[in-house]
Amino acid sequence: MAGPAPPAARPFSAPVPSPLIESLFCTGIVAAQLSGAPDVTALTPDEARACLGVSQKRRDDFAAGRICARRALREFGYDAFSLLAGDDRRPRWPDGIVGSISHTHGFCGVAVADAERYESVGFDVEEVGRVGEELWPNLFTAFERSILEMRSGAERATLATLLFSAKEAFYKCRYGVTPGWLDFTDVTIVADADDERCGTFAVRCGPQEQAERTSRVGRYALSGDLVLTGIATP
């Protein structure tokens, strides 16, 4: 009697250029995205060693980010560069390059730029519905919660995801210039919808960040059940 059939191999996805992510920034940003399972065999030997012993999910997230980054870095003349992490777990980009990686279930995206054009880049993607109301006191300011409470249903879930994602993108961008910790409630996001699927947001820091009280502006876009946000420092 024949034994059980071997498990079917996972279909792998390839990274592609991402006009959607690029639309979150001004000109000069190169972006790539990957939807689905990454081919972990595409990692360089150094990258493969860096994710030994981790769970499959963490390995897949790591691989998706590196494969996407390689696709974007190709536009700057890099091909087989090993994108490893520093002690702070942030990617160590090639000299002269700044960038940002984000992933959620089944999707990964990367935005990179020439460091002579941008000092720092922050990109984030989140799945709508994963920022439950029980998390609001730890994530949102009183002003943000008051805005959320005026919404209901799907609109509330989308806005909560947008506010959280915008903070994540801002923190990534800010850390690239001024390493240090900000609490989620130290920052207020004010979203200004241009239309139903995309718009801008302003970032306003609290009193303890006196040097950053001037609003910073980023952009967001909705794609299916995903919210994508981006902000950069020229």
Image: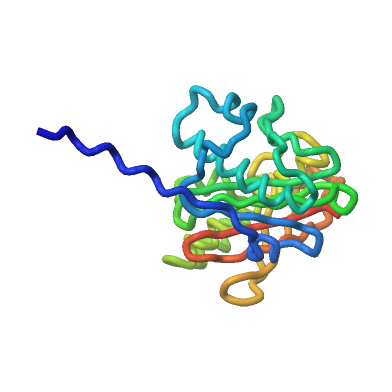
Is 205 displayed left or right of 194 in the figure? Answer: right
**Which residue occupies 57% across, 29% down?**
48
The image quadrant where one finds the N terminus is top left
Single out the residue that lies furthest toward the front.
1
Height in image: 81 above or below 203? Answer: above
The x and y percentages for residue 34 are 55, 53
Residue 180 seen: yes
The C terminus is located in which quarter? Answer: bottom right
Residue 98, given in percent of the width and then of the height, sits at 79, 45
User: Residue furthest toward the right?
Assistant: 116
**Which of these two is toward me, 146 or 205?**
205
Q: Residue at x 87, y 46 (%)?
A: 211
Compared with 27, 182 (above or below) is above
Q: Of 213 and 218, which appears nearest the observer?
A: 218
Q: Please give the count of numbered marks on the rendered protein.
A: 0
Q: What residue is drawn where x is 46% and y is 48%?
A: 12
- Indicate left or right for 206 with 224 as reference: right
Q: Compared to 167, does 83 lie above or below? A: above
At horizontal 48% and vertical 65% (from top left) the residue drawn is 224
Q: Give the x, y percent position of residue 6.
A: 27, 37
Q: Considering depth in this image, is 208 or 116 the residue closer to the camera?
A: 116
- Residue 176 on image: x %, y %: 78, 41
The residue positioned farthest toward the left in the image shown: 1
What colour scheme was applied to this rendering of the protein?
rainbow
Determine whether, in the image, residue 199 is placed left or right of residue 177.
Answer: left
Report if residue 131 is visible in the image: no
